[in-house]
Image (spheres, helix red, strand yellow):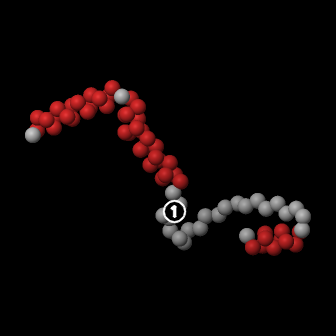
Amino acid sequence: MIRPLKALIVKETKLLFRDPAGLIMLFVLPSLFIFVLSIALQGTFSSASVKEKMDVVLVNSGDRSFGDEIGKGL
C-alpha cells in the first residue's frame, strides 16, 4: 500500500515541476486571490461604532434650490 502511494507522489511531483504554469496555478494565483480579497473586504468586519468618512463632490448647476436640498441630505 505504501509503495504505490510513494510512487504516485513522486510521479506527480516530477510532473508538477516540469509544468511552470501548473506551479503558478497551484501556488501564486490562490495567494493573489486571497491578497486581493483581503484588500477589498478590509472594512467589512470592522466594528460598527467606527465610522469612516468619505469625501463627496457635488456639482450644483441649474436649479440651485434643488441642488441645495440634495447637498443638505447628503
Q: Is residue 62 above or below residue 2?
A: below
Quarter the C terminus occupies: bottom right
| Residue under numbered circle 1 | 44
Q: Residue at x 36, y 28 (%)?
A: 19
Q: Quadrant of residue 6?
A: top left
Q: Is residue 43 left or right of residue 2?
A: right
Q: Residue at x 61, y 64 (%)?
A: 52
Q: Nearer the viewer, residue 55 or 60?
A: 60
Q: Is residue 65 above or below residue 12?
A: below
Q: Is residue 37 above or below residue 17?
A: below
**Element assignment for label 1:** loop
Q: Is residue 38 above or below residue 65?
A: above
Q: Residue at x 50, y 68 (%)?
A: 47
Q: Position of residue 22 (x, y in %)?
A: 37, 34
Q: Nearer the viewer, residue 33 or 47?
A: 33
Q: Quadrant of residue 65?
A: bottom right
Which residue reaches farthest top? 18
Q: Position of residue 30 (x, y in %)?
A: 41, 44
Quarter the N terminus occupies: top left
Inspect the image, locate mark 1, and give the three-letter code of the amino acid beneath it.
Thr
Q: Position of residue 35 (x, y in %)?
A: 47, 47
Q: Residue at x 70, y 60 (%)?
A: 55
Numbered disc total:
1
Q: Nearer the viewer, residue 9 or 43?
A: 9
Q: Is residue 70 left or right of residue 4?
A: right
**Label 1 crowding class (10 Å Cα cut-off): few <14, some 14-19, many 20+?**
few
Q: Position of residue 43 (x, y in %)?
A: 53, 60
